[in-house]
Amino acid sequence: MPPESIGLCSSPPSARFNNQILSIVEVSVADGMKTPLNRFRLDGLVAIVTGGGNGIGRATAEILVEAGAAVALIDCDERAVENTKVALLAAGAQVGAYIVDVTDEAAIEASFASVDHQWGRLDILVNNAGISIRHPTMELSLADWNSVVAVNMTAVFLGCRAAARHMLRRGTGSIVNTASIMGLSGGGLYPNVSYQATKGGVVSLIRALAIEWARQGIRVNAVAPTWVKTQFIASLTVLGPL
Ligand SMILES: NC(=O)c1ccc[n+]([C@@H]2O[C@H](COP(=O)([O-])OP(=O)(O)OC[C@H]3O[C@@H](n4cnc5c(N)ncnc54)[C@H](O)[C@@H]3O)[C@@H](O)[C@H]2O)c1
């Protein structure tokens, strides 16, 4: 399905494609309709969103704030993090911002510990940062393969482990990882083997962690979006079919 035909509801085009998730909720609230947020409150809870500066991560941070959570943004894009932070603060949110490369083990451990220390708890992790380096397999270098594995899979492990370090102490927590429909189907914008393999790997990784940590009170899940019109998908589609 081309991104132009993604229609989540009958809201006007500006609400559909400009910060789409939050905008749709705003439209519904303005209409006085019931939304999931009427029943789904996160007041007093603390969340970390990786890749929170842009796209799906930013929309997720916005919706978490809307539900009442304090949110720490983690991203390597300094300007995007700052812009998102300013927007969330203007909405009255409690927001933290960390300029961190999610593949940096020490920086992830330090930033998660800082969140736990600053707010006294860590309840939710949205492991969302991701990249794609799209080449036909025969032209894909090992360096490019390794970069995608590092961000899309190794960093998911690092984030889950760093979050669990704090969640296990309190016996509760929820981790949501952004996988992709492309990791389940093998299709979509192929050839893109490193992306498809790592997103499929995330699904297996979260299944293993969900079972390992279930008895200790941590829920581990993944979402597998199809196309969402972000800078990420724009950079992939501009290449056209390879
Ligand atoms: N857009 C889609 O159609 C789509 C579909 C399925 C899954 N996804 C997944 O959703 C997630 C978010 O994608 P998006 O479309 O919002 O992309 P995006 O490019 O708009 O946002 C990704 C964010 O991750 C950050 N990031 C990338 N590498 C990082 C690193 N090493 N350290 C810290 N931050 C880093 C970027 O700076 C950016 O802010 C990704 O995991 C992506 O694979 C996207």
Image (spheres, rainbow, N blue to C red):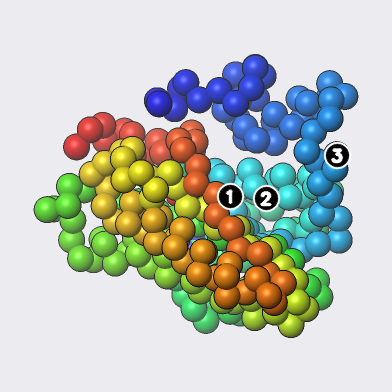
Question: What residue is at 78 percent from the left and 78 percent from the top?
Answer: 170
Quadrant of the image for the N terminus?
top left
Image location of residue 194, percent across then percent down: 29, 56
Residue 36 in which image quadrant: top right
Considering the numbered disc 3 on the image, is that residue within a helix, a strand or a loop?
helix
Label 3 or label 2, whichever comes before in sequence order: 3
- Can you identify the residue that label 3 sits on? 38
- Circle 3 or circle 2, nearest the eye: 3
Between 54 and 179, the one lying in front of the other is 179
Circles 3 and 1: CB atoms closer than 8 Å: no
Labels 3 & 2 near each other (Cβ < 8 A) = no
Q: Position of residue 177 (x, y in %)?
A: 55, 57
- Is the CB–ligand 1 distance for label 3 below 8 Å? no
- Image check: 217 left or right of 134? right
The residue type indicated by label 1 comes to Gly
Q: Outermost residue toward the left?
A: 138
Q: Secondary structure at mark 1?
A: helix
Q: Is mark 2 within 8 Å of ligand 1?
A: no
Badge 1 local density, few (<14 within 10 Å), some, or many (20+)? many
**Side of 34 relative to 175 (left or right):** right
Amino acid at dot 2: Ala
- The quadrant holding residue 185 is top left
One can see residue 112 in this view: no
Residue at left offset 62%, top offset 74%: 213
Q: Nearer the viewer, mark 3 or mark 1?
A: 3
Q: Are marks 1 and 2 in contact (CB under 8 Å)?
A: yes
Mark 2 lies on residue: 61
- Mark sitting on residue 151: none
- Checking the image for residue 57, the label placed there is 1
Q: Residue at x 13, y 53 (%)?
A: 139
Q: What type is the residue that disc 3 sits on?
A: Asn
Whether the residue under disc 1 has CB within 8 Å of ligand 1? yes
